[in-house]
Every structure is written in C-alpha cells, then in structure tokens.
Image (tube, rainbow, N blue to C red):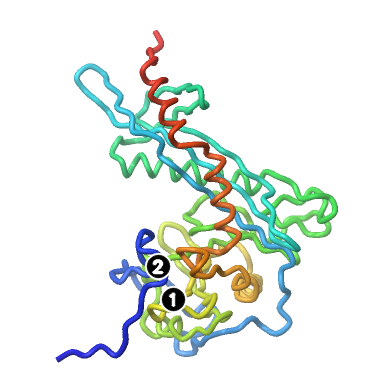
Amino acid sequence: MRRFESLAIEGWSPEYGSPVDMEREEVPAEQVDAAVELAEEEWRPMGAAEGVRIPTRVYFVDGVRRIEARVWMTEGDESRLGICASYAAGVVRCGRKAEIVAAEVRRGFFGRAGVPDLVTRAGAFSACPVADDDLPQLINGLQERMGRLEVQVAGGWKESRSHVDSARVGLGADSNGANSPLHPGVLIAMDGPLRGRQRIPGAIGYVKSHRVQYLPAGPRAVVARLAPRQRTPIFLIQTKFTRYSWYLRLTEGTGHPWAGIVRCEAWPDTELERIGKIADATAAVLPRFASEPHKDDRAPQNLYPIAGLERELRRRLGDPGLMYRALQRAVADYRPKD
C-alpha cells in the first residue's frame, strides 16, 4: 500500500493555478543546449560570483489587461465576435525608493478586418484587426498589443540628467552615452517571458510559473537543490526564438521542490561573459523584492514592485462598470459609415 511521506499546501492562491504544471510540455533535446556555461555533468547550484556588482537601480516593466465587453458584429446573416478591452503598461524604478516613472493606458476593439473604431463617453476603443474571431485569437491580439505597449513605455522615457544624460530605460546607455547591454549598476526586468517581442537590449524576462520543461533529467535535478539566492548555470533555448536562460530560487518555498523558483531569459546578442554577470546580478538582487504569503497570493514569485505596479495600472484602467455602461450606450448608438 502506498504511504506518502509528507503533505504540503501549495503557496499560490488556487485562483492563479499552480506555479508548476505537473504535465509540462517538453522541449526536444536538440532545441536546448544545457552545456553553455558548464557541461551537463558539472551542473551545480551557483551563487553570485565574488565581486559581482550589485545593481543600484532596478527597473520592472509590466502590463495589465481587462476585457470590458464581448461585442457581436452582424453583417447580413452572419455574426462575428469581437472584444473591447483596456490594457496598460508601466515602469517602476527601485533605488532608494520605489516609484512609477512611466505608465500608459490604451483601449482597443478587437475583431476581424473591418472592425470599426468605437467612441464612447469613457474614451475611444481603437480598431485592432485580428485574423480570426475565436476568443483565443482575440485574446492573442490583445496580448500582442499589450506587449508592444510594454516595449514602447520601457524605451520611451528618459532618465533624469542626475543619473545618465539622455539614457533611455532598457537601452543601457553607458557613461559616454553609448548603448551597452547592461548599464553599470542597472538591471531591467520585463515581467513574463521575452516571447520574441521587440528587443530592449539588456532587458531580461522574468518568468514566475513553469509550463514547459526545458532541461534534461540531470540539470533539472539541480533546480530542486538550489538554495535561496542561488542560480543554475546558463543554458540556451532555441524554439520560436533564441534566448539564454537560467533558474534561480528567491527564498525558501513550501509545497514542492520547485517552490520559490523563477526563470530568467536574456537575448543572445550579448557576449556570454556579460550574460553571466547579468545572471549573477539577478541572483543577488531579485530575492530582495520577493513577496510574502500574507501580502501576496503569488508569493514569493510575484515581486513587490511588480505587484504594486499592477495595482496602479489596474486603477488607471478605470471603473469596469462605467466602461461597460459606456460601451452599451456606444453600441446602441452605433451607425456604420457610408
């Protein structure tokens, strides 16, 4: 008779699912090179290298989205589904204090080609055509627009001249104004995987949950052995796009061996030595921002600055009831243009 040795409650709130999918999709071995930094048989938990420079400023970039209403568009005997949605993106800077330094809100009407702009008393929902009108495709279109806005916001504002003159967040201008992958003392983290979106040199992707299995058995076992503030060696993933990656443990977690584990990604157009310094910087600094269970339902992976930015962006989306009523009125008053 089977006898389980222990039980544990998953740390994340059930409404967010689990940070680790037990039936993860496996990436073919030929699409992953685990021997980038160390040979597979030499894999071990790694702390930040001695003398690693700790970033003095960390920027977190994130976006939020909300579907305001589903809208049916009728032409003759045929009806097509669309969605009206609001989305926002912003940047929070963490140095001596945390402050939101950029935030933008957009609204879109997502549907098949020919979808109109929809003007409401609460703002205009711009036409956003997609290839098909099934709900997953509509949501993909929304996600794509939000990702573009994240890149736009992250790269579109300037640091104060007290830091680096004309240095754009994410572009990593050095003291001479030249672009470098990692500005000395600065780390830029995009919440979520890089997803092949437009590149911000020097920015990393910060992945909170694990839906895909990238590593073979030997290196995978090392992930479970990580102590807080330790990382795995760097490996290379080549699927729809190519990127470097590594796992790190933020804090002690409960529930399973991968509790408290996150995965980071970096673009491969940077020399490997520099990627190693970035990876060391993440292991040294990101655990500082790890959330606690009594304050966040996705602790510790949902970092405090990201959670605070999400709350502010959702506030800026406006009242959902007001948006819904404004859309009802706009749809009732809609007349197609001749």
Residue name at image x 30 percent, y 35 percent: 133
Name the foreground residue: 112 vs 54: 54
- The span from disc 2 to disc 1 (Cα, nearest Å) is 8 Å
> Residue 79 appears at what percent x and percent y?
24, 25
Q: In this rendering, would 158 be left or right of 146? A: right
Q: In this rendering, would 244 be left or right of 19? A: right
Quarter of the N terminus within the rendering: bottom left
Contact check, label 2 and label 1, Cβ < 8 Å:
yes
Residue name at image x 53 percent, y 58 percent: 191
Quarter of the figure with residue 85 = top left
> Residue 286 appears at what percent x and percent y?
61, 70
Which residue was labeled with disc 2? 19
> Residue 137 appears at what percent x and percent y?
33, 42
Residue 296 appears anywhere in the view: yes
Image height of 243 relative to 228, above or below: above
As drawn, the residue found furthest toward the top would be 338
Which residue was labeled with disc 1? 259
